[in-house]
Amino acid sequence: MAVPWLELEVVYLAQDLNLSNSRVIYAILDIETTGGKYNEEGITEIAIYKYDGHKVIDQFISLINPEKDIQPFVVNLTGINSNMLRNAPKFYEVAKRIVEITEGSILVAHNAKFDYRVLKMEFKRLGFEFEKQTLCTVELAKKLIPGHPSYSLGKITRSLGIPVSDRHRASGDAFATVKLFSMLLAKDIEKSIVQQTIRLEPKYQLEPKLIDIIEGLPSVTGVYYMHKEDGEIIYIGKSKNIKKRVNQHFTSQSHKSRKIQLQVSAVTYEETGSELIALLKESEEIKRNKPLYNRAQRRTIFTHGLFYFEDDHGYLNLKIAKVGKNDRPVTTFANLQSAKSFMSRVTEEVQLCQKLTGIYKTNSNCFNYTIKLCNGACIMEEPVESYNTRVMQIIEHHSFARDNMVIVDRGRSIDERSAILIENGIYRGFGFYNLNYQITNFEVLQSIITPMQHNRDTQHIIQSYMRRNSRLKVLKLNDVGLDR
């Protein structure tokens, strides 16, 4: 959109604003947005207070029509809905006023990297480069008043006794930031911290190279690969939103992320559609490529397993235990808590005995027997055959040791599906097929499969995914037609 005024120099009358070149002026702002994808948000409300270090000397507050939908959770948080914005000005209609009130000022915001990024993005859409020195009150507060459990605007102002009205509305949050900033200026006795914190970009603003990389990535499910300049892969990851996940790598200040940011030269990706395939590809390719920053993921990713044994009375007992090198559990779990949750759920679902699943330690009957939810296997009242039948249902359902099956999941497009092949309990690989192309026999199925390695990690990934996605389509190999 062409905006004529952006091509003109903005002229100020210094006497009208009573400004002096020796004074530092701050533009303290807060922005509310529509939410949504990174760099696709729209501004719904803006408040700017011009502050000379002692008092507010100018202000601008306005709702803004973002010309796009507002995310429901944002409506619930701010109370701003599309009906309120129908007759509000669009951003280009208030852009000149924003330039005027921020001219010659240092931009101040609570979490400045967000507000500044969104504001720059809106101006960039108009073809105008909006560049400001900035200060972040989150960073200043951490340095000047350390030790607080939280530095969110609501909690830090509450702990400092700063009143806040209209929380999560731009005017209320911006004015609370004015009060907080005033207190921080007073605490900066030497003024050295404030001077050192001033910068052209917020502390964690992305380098141009990293921004270019992010802009070239899609918001899809798949596996991504971070490369050095010579092409070497230094990190492999998977995500349901590759663009969002890589952005998190590039904005994180963890030790590993900072190293990656310094070394990464390019990011390539493979779309999978299916999260399960992304998990399986990530696991195999980390083992194959041994990227520098995937060391933790080279190790096995499960700790506990489900085992069963027959007791002296002939009853099948289930138990959770750590998985040893040569153990063959029915299924595996990432941690003890998920294993316990699984055991509690299946005990309730098929009315197993709490004593025989290790949930209730006792020498007599279990608690569920007392409330008539156990048929009495704990005191040998229920026939062994009847009880063991239900236990075997659990074992067979959660183990594919001898299974021949195909797991059907999402594809990379609306008219595509993915197929994960399990043959004789061994993971053979995955493939994709178009819904217009019917898979009618095993030979055709094998032809679309990309062979992959079977190991305990892949078995854990598949079993864990199937537990979490109970509606997943699973077909036995003698079933015909994967497209139904």
Image (cartoon, rainbow, N blue to C red):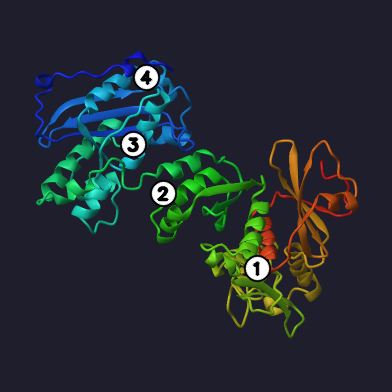
Q: Are marks 1 and 3 in contact (CB under 8 Å)?
A: no
Q: Which residue is mark 3?
A: 115
Q: Which comes sooner in the sequence, label 4 or label 1?
A: 4
Badge 4: few (under 14), some or many (20 or more) residues near its Cα, within 10 Å?
some
Q: Which residue is mark 1?
A: 332
Looking at the picture, does residue 379 appear above or below residue 195?
Answer: below
Q: How much space separates mark 3 and mark 2, taking CA atoms?
A: 15 Å
Q: Which comes sooner in the sequence, label 1 or label 2?
A: 2
Residue 122, percent from left and from top: 39, 28
User: Which mark identifies residue 92?
Assistant: 4
Q: Amino acid at mark 4?
A: Tyr
Q: Which comes sooner in the sequence, label 4 or label 2?
A: 4
Residue 388, percent from left and from top: 77, 72
Q: Amino acid at mark 1?
A: Thr
Whether residue 282 is visible: yes
Looking at the picture, does residue 144 appear above or below residue 1?
Answer: below
Tag nearer the camera, 3 or 2: 2
Locate the C terminus by quadrant.
Answer: top right
Looking at the picture, does residue 12 appear above or below residue 318?
Answer: above
Q: Which residue is mark 2?
A: 251
Q: Amino acid at mark 2?
A: Thr
Q: Which comes sooner in the sequence, label 3 or label 4?
A: 4
Q: Give the left or right position of residue 205, taking residue 15 as reference.
A: right
